[in-house]
Amino acid sequence: MTAILEAVGVSKSFTTGFLRKNRFHAVEDISLRINADDASVTAIAGESGSGKTTLARLLLKMIQPTEGTVLYRGHNLRVITNREQKSYRREVQAVFQDPFEVYNPFYKVDAVLHGPAEKFRLAETRAKRQKLIDQALEMAGLRPEETLGRYPHQLSGGQRQRVMVARAILLRPKVLIADEPVSMVDASLRATILETLLKLNREFGAALIYITHDLTTAFQISDNIYILYKGSVVEAGDTDKAINDPRHPYTQLLVRSIPRPDPKAKWGPPERASALGLRASSGCKFAPRCPMAMQRCWDTMPPLFQGDVDRVAACYLEDKHPHVMAKDMSSVLG
């Protein structure tokens, strides 16, 4: 099956400090495959600083990987032709966390819709383009007469976000990368926005990459999930299995932290530091926080062990299972 978008062993490191330079990996050795004929929903989950947004920026060609390759229909994004670049920009769309940053405050919101409609020649005449724009806004839950003609500051955060969803609907992308699309809107609007994204997935066959720190919504809408911790994949595979029967201690911690609709229910035991102490680890990145850490966890980074046909976990507690290379992870899950 052809991959429309694929990351193969991608890493991204940054240098910090002025006098004393330090390098850290925001993303480290991650492989992910989105098939062209499979309109799946893949969640990328983890706490703040886990590398989720950096991975999204790599897939969107906003930054280049330090190592590894991002492929669009089998072609390296670094060297694609202008024609392939235009096709990529139409087929791979994004909805970002903060919708206000996407807009130019000096232009009316119409610009983010008319611009791509004209650039990609979605219709022959302006009247036909306007009809497509109106239909996209209505699908996103907005009334064109109440939305168009306004400046970004004249719309609420939820309205601005739904305009960006309408923009994605307008272009009929093959892949939509949604980076925390509901984290900055009211709770009452989250279901509406997520339902619209799922409509784009179901009705138009767009694969959805849903980036979130919220395991609850990831569980509700995604088929597969990648759990990141400090830039590395610690568990990945079928969402139901990963949430209902997590194998990695970090995933277990995240699941225990999900609030329950019962004021008398406890969230679970508090996080405990490893008995080996809070010291730097050259092995597993989670070892300083893991209550089950062993000496080899501190010494050597664990590989990905394949405990199920469609799941891997980077934990020595799973070492009875065969391990897979990170670069082969996407094919194992795929």
Image (cartoon, rainbow, N blue to C red):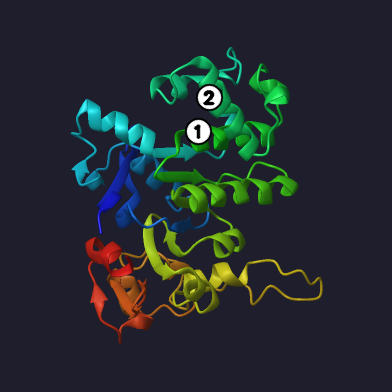
Q: Residue furthest right?
A: 263
**Which quarter shows the N terminus?**
bottom left
Q: Residues within 10 Å of mark 1 (few under 14, many from 20)?
A: many
Which residue was labeled with disc 1? 170
Q: Quadrant of residue 272?
A: bottom right
Q: Identify the residue at horizontal 67%, vertical 26% (top origin).
A: 144
- Residue 325 in the image, given as x and y percentages of width and height: 22, 67
Using the image as rendered, state which of residue 228 and residue 123 is in the foreground.
Answer: 123
| Residue 138 placement, left or right of 300 | right
Q: Identify the residue at horizontal 62%, vertical 39% (top origin).
A: 139
- Identify the secondary structure beneath mark 1: helix
- Residue 58 in the image, given as x and y percentages of width and height: 34, 42
Which residue was labeled with disc 2? 113
Q: Is residue 110 visible?
A: yes
* Up-down relation of residue 50 to residue 104 (above or below): below
| Residue 65 placement, left or right of 136 | left
Q: Quadrant of residue 121?
A: top left
- Residue 149 in the image, given as x and y percentages of width and height: 66, 16
Marks 1 and 2, Cα distance to the nearest angstrom?
A: 8 Å
| Residue 113 placement, left or right of 26 | right
